[in-house]
Image: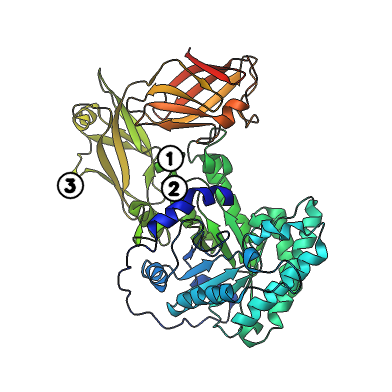
Amino acid sequence: MASMLLALFATAGLLLGAGLTAPAAEAAPQVPRVPANAKHAVAEMQPSWNLGNTLDAIPDETSWGNPLTTRAHLAKIRSEGFRSVRIPVTWTDHQSATAPYAVDAAFMDRVEEITDFALAEGLYVVLNVHHDSWQWVDQMPTDHDNVMARFNSLWTQISSTFKDKPRTLLFESINEPEFENATAQQKATLLNELNTSFHKIVRGSGGKNGNRLLVLPTIYCTPDQALMDTLYNTIKSLNDPNLVATVHYYSWFPFSVNIAGGTHYDEAARKDLDGAFQRMRDTFVARGIPVYLGEYGLLSWPDHHHPSRVERGEALKYFEHFGHAARQAGVTTALWDPFAYLNRQTFQWRDQELFDLIRASWTTRSGSTSFDRLFVPKSGRITDQSLTLNRNGLSFRGLWHGDRKLVAGSDYTVSGDRLTLKAAALTRLAGDRSYGDNATLQARFSRGLPWKLHVATYDAPQQTGASGTTSALAVPTRFRGDHLATMEAKYADGTNAGPTDWTAFQEFNISFTPDYAGDTITLTEKFLTSLRDNAPVTLTFHFYSGTKITYQVVKSGSTVTGSTV
């Protein structure tokens, strides 16, 4: 992640500079009074936001494309309804790697300045040790004493600097801890040692650190039961009422990155989310230990620099469900925002509709349908089409096209959770049936935000032969109004082809990527170089209309040829 973002955003950061002037902020509220009970205090922090790819960037604050943080940025976050902010900090390049492991004074001052911006805006703040986890802390199994000495020195310096800050400032021991070449039991032991040492240092440092809320992670910040059980045991052994558990959640992996057929937010993805929050509630919340979910989102969506690998409506369903599950479990959640949500140059949300849905999920549910697009043919007769209503406990109020409400009975019917658009209404909405979206409907429910439903005209996509090298093969593809969902790759003997040979369905934007404007699907170098020489590979391109197209590629040395089947 670090190397990729360095390359991607270094130039952008130079070009964009400090950005536009922020709008004038309203008067900041007073510093919140922190409830004595830790669960109540963490509940007051909901919702939360991450100042990602900033002080955690490597090596400096603007290295990954974000501008220098100002108080106006934090004022914007507060004005949008956030009540706390997590400030990830990577200290590695600003701390001596040898004793006494001193932190550069100017960097410490900058961390304190940004922290003070947030505190002055009436926000709770979570301050941590971030990418150090994989830069030097992960060497603890083989360099135990040096890692512990450096970690202890770092938290001694942080504790001293911030000891007089209000209790609205929380400390998080370390982000996503990992340890190289260690067994599961060894990892558990090492993390317990780090968390216990962190606790002892902060508590003994004076000032307001004696009862400051301290945040402790699981291994990798993963919400697996065994890892949370280990953290629970650490917290109980410390016998401190001001401790908080933290984990992260980025959805079921196949859906989060669109691999292994994870093209929809389906039952498997929903079950994964419900199970994670159930475990958080049972392991911690029900036992009086608050949970601060320090990062959430999808691993590869939104991405404004590449084709969208996760279908939009399916992503919206995930965020809506996430907010509901968090409220049910009593978990405070922090949106991971490296650059994808708030444009810190313009102070505008990059995708207002997405943010509106996330904000709505903090307090209520929104409804949806089984998919957000109805495909009608380019020519020939249009027939009735049905979708499933996901009511989410709400009442369905009807369909609108702009200001016009469609007529129940003649334009559509509802039978149980089955919503059927009538052929006559679809024909009218499709208009001249030009390829792509012809009309957008709103399905409205008794609460929450309307659900957008697109009426799209398509024909089966068409492909032609191509030749190239293992650097890339551009497969000519006339999409004709359809949208690519995934690509399946198999050898003639039925075994899986591609770099992720544990599944036939390859990873979107990693093995293949569409260019809708350019009418191509590019097979990437990573995919092509993984293929066996002179072994034909059958590709099946799956589209969201339900269309499947078969294509064949053969690699011979550095040459690749493709042909239709």
Judged from the image, the secondary structure of the residue bearing numbered disc 1 is loop
The answer to whether residue 241 is visible is: no
Q: State which tag comes first along the sequence, 2 or 1.
A: 2
Q: Where is residue 260 in the image (x, y as percent from the top left)?
A: 57, 33
Q: Is mark 3 on a helix, strand or loop?
A: loop
Q: In this rendering, does residue 401 appear at all? A: yes
Check disc 1 and report the residue beneath it: 308
Give the left or right position of residue 463, taking residue 435 as reference.
right
The residues bearing labels 3 and 1 have C-alpha atoms spaced at a distance of 30 Å
Residue drawn where x is 81% and y is 60% of the image: 143
| Point 41% across, 26% down: residue | 520
- The x and y percentages for residue 163 are 61, 83
Left or right: 33, with 219 as reference point: left
* Residue 10: x %, y % from top left: 48, 53
Q: Is residue 453 above or below residue 12?
A: above
Q: Say if 559 sits above or below 173 in the image.
A: above
Task: Report how far apart the C-alphas of labels 2 and 1 lie in the structure.
Answer: 7 Å
**Mark sitting earlier along the chain (2/3):** 2
Mark 2 near mark 3, Cβ–Cβ under 8 Å? Answer: no
Label at residue 302: 2
Task: State the residue in front, 74 or 346.
Answer: 346
Element under disc 2: loop
The answer to whether the residue labelled 2 contacts the one labelled 1, judged by CB atoms less than 8 Å apart, is yes
- The residue indicated by pointer 3 is 403
Crowding at mark 3 (Cα within 10 Å: few <14, some 14-19, many 20+) = few
Q: In this view, does 548 lie to the left or right of 259?
A: left
Amino acid type at mark 2: Pro
Q: Which amino acid does label 1 sit on?
A: Ser
What's the residue type where badge 3 is placed?
Asp
Q: How was this image coloured?
A: rainbow
Q: How many labels does the image show?
A: 3
